[in-house]
Amino acid sequence: MAIAAEPIDIAARRDPSASVVNLRDSPLAVHELTVSYGEKPAVFSVDTMVPPQSMTAIIGPNGAGKSTLLKAALGIVPRLSGRVTVFGQPVEKAMHRIAYVPQRASVDWDFPTRVIDVVLMGLYRELGLVRLVRRNHRERALSCLERVGMADFADRQIGQLSGGQQQRVFLARALAQNADLYLLDEPFAGVDAATEKAIIDVLKSLKAEQRTVVCVHHDLATVADYFDHVLLINVRKIAEGPVATVFTGENLQKTYGGRLATTHIDQLKLPVG
Amino acid sequence: MSSIFLNALVLQSGYNAALVALGAALLGIAAGSGGTFLFLRKRALVSDAVAHATLPGVGLAFMIMVAFGGDGRNLIGLLLGSAVTAGLGLLAVEWITRRTRLAEDAAIGAVLSVFFGVGIVFLTIIQSMSSGNQAGLEGFLLGSTAGMLFRDAVVIAVGGALAVAVVILLRRPMTLVAFDTEFAATAGINVRRMDLAMMGLVMAVTVIGLKLVGLILIVAMLIIPPVTARFWTERTDRVIWIGGAVGGVSGYLGAAISASAPNLPTGPIIVLVSFGLFVLSLLFAPRRGMLAALFRRRRFQLRVHRRQGLLALAHNEPIFDRLTLSVLSREGLIRQDQVPTEKGRAQAAKALRDEKRWAVARQLYADEAVEGRYDGLTPIETVLTWDEIAEIDRVIGPPTAILS
């Protein structure tokens, strides 16, 4: 089989002209973004600049607007104000360089579709309306499933999967998109330990391939292990920067307020300083 | 009666009956496949609002055509009129849902009844008009086949073929939107436009089906076939094909049945035939059908009771559950007096050993591949290799015999 599961193989297939042009620009820059579902802003005037080839965690309490920030950046949720650029281009023009992994709970898993079909959805931009799904598409989808350890499940109906397996299928679909910027909404929510390991391994390999990963994340205990950058928000931006300097007890206290006990913060593997 | 039905089935009971049967089959195919995405997008009832919103258009078109001195019953004119108000109704539902805090069901209820009410008012006015030949307009409510012309069949054939072509062309983006709207939006699909295309499709099918089945029952032709198809497959593309086939067969059979006896209304019979196919699928579909589900559940229940019974024997505990007792005695694992037989003791020992092996295995292999397979029923040898089991047995020690 010509398709190997090696990440480098997929990286090589990328259109070089598309990747080189502006890899130095921030993969995701948000300026004064405000989103509101009614009269009360869910995200208020947030500025952020995700560094290239970083792994960034968006952190904050429930209802802090983490997912909303991602969705508004992508235009899934209307923006009240603000500008979003992706690799220096307006986000609308750069959508083909983004792969988005929604929350698992956002879809109906009894939908009549198989695992492989879901991954093939990641090739939609390539297949368009009329192009037939050929063997090489199928093999690429399978190699993406291979990377998340789900190749044996290709022909299963998606409803028969466990939560962790569903999440891995979603990640495989994003891999099929072969993007430069990966945006994931709570990829570790409610998954088993094996899946968590599989997902973080894939995300780290994406970083090794010079891609950028941004996750909405809720588990403070794993932030320092998994990510190199953090964005702390609670409707407004609290802080952003490298984990080593920004992921501090003081900043967490500011982000979570009284909702995070001091003892809890003490238990976290916080960088010294 | 039966020979009349057979004649109708092979299009031998007259020109009109043959036209109706072919038209109904084509309409069924278009509606069955076109309704698939409506069903998968969970917006089935929007089609009801659209269908009811055709009525004022029919009345208006009639009045306008009469006012300009034409034939008020010109089919193309009536259908154009119905399409216009159906479109307005659709936009009204969309607008109310997007711009107000009302949910879609409330918007549907409001639009459906208001448009239908206006339509009935128009029909009443028309009935009191002296000019124009207004007979037959009520046929748009429940459908009528009496005066079906070749031209009407052509309208259905052309419109239906276009609808099917649109379904085939847009099946990929529509599937994406129905499954995962957020992802679809990021994959370069204009979700709003795709939803409008879907509703446009529904509108087209409704309009071409108005004359034959009427606006009240057309919803059934859009929804029942894909719902029926869903019982037979786990793949979206097949739901489309099977849905089209169910719709086509229902249309053809329904038309043939209604032609085989006087006073059998075509539209309602078509709906009843497709309902029959739905019930058959609901009961007998191999995986998703009710009988299959009942059977699976019963088999699982028996496995659970068998296992519980064996473990009770192994631990020398009394068994009180009657189902457990009957499962064990039916397999010859216990005697009448509930004392385990030779075979029962052997199986109980195996079950106990299996449990112990699982307990060790779940500590050794704390990953999903092993841990996730433990349900208290799966024999460990179907998950681990014999080498791995031998490893576990070294930890447990030799098997214990079960004494009666």
Image (spheres, coloured by chain):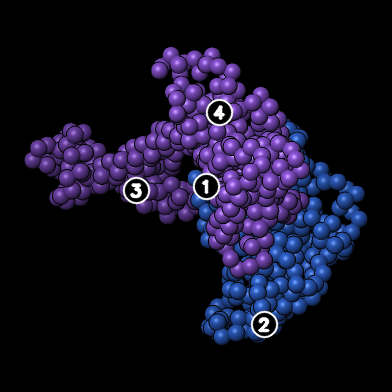
Which residue appears at 68% of the width and 53% of the height?
A: B88
Return the disc, 4 or 3, that comes first in the chain's sequence.
4
Q: Amino acid at mark 2?
A: Asn
- Give the alpha-carbon distance from disc 3 to disc 1, as whole Å: 26 Å
Q: Nearer the viewer, mark 2 or mark 1?
A: 1
Please provide percent x and percent y for residue A102: 64, 58
- Give the alpha-carbon distance from disc 4 to disc 3, as whole Å: 65 Å
Residue behind mark 1: A110
Please provide percent x and percent y for residue B205: 64, 39
CB under 8 Å between discs 2 and 3 = no
Which residue appears at 64% of the width and 63% of the height?
A: B96
Q: Nearer the viewer, mark 1 or mark 4?
A: 4
Tell me the blue chain.
Answer: A
| Secondary element at image label 3 | loop
Chain letter belonging to callout 2:
A
The answer to which of B365 and A83 lies nearer the viewer is A83
- Whether residue A145 is visible, yes or no, is no
Q: Which label belongs to residue B349?
A: none
The quarter of the picture where residue B351 lies is top left
Is circle 1 on the same chain as circle 4?
Answer: no
Q: What colour do you see for chain B?
A: purple
Q: Amino acid at mark 4?
A: Ala
| Secondary element at image label 1 | loop
Residue behind mark 3: B376
For the C terminus of chain A, give its image quadrant.
bottom right
Q: Amino acid at mark 3?
A: Gly
The answer to which of A158 and A38 lies nearer the viewer is A38
Residue behind mark 4: B146
Is circle 3 on the same chain as circle 1?
Answer: no
Which residue appears at 21% of the width and 39% of the height?
A: B327
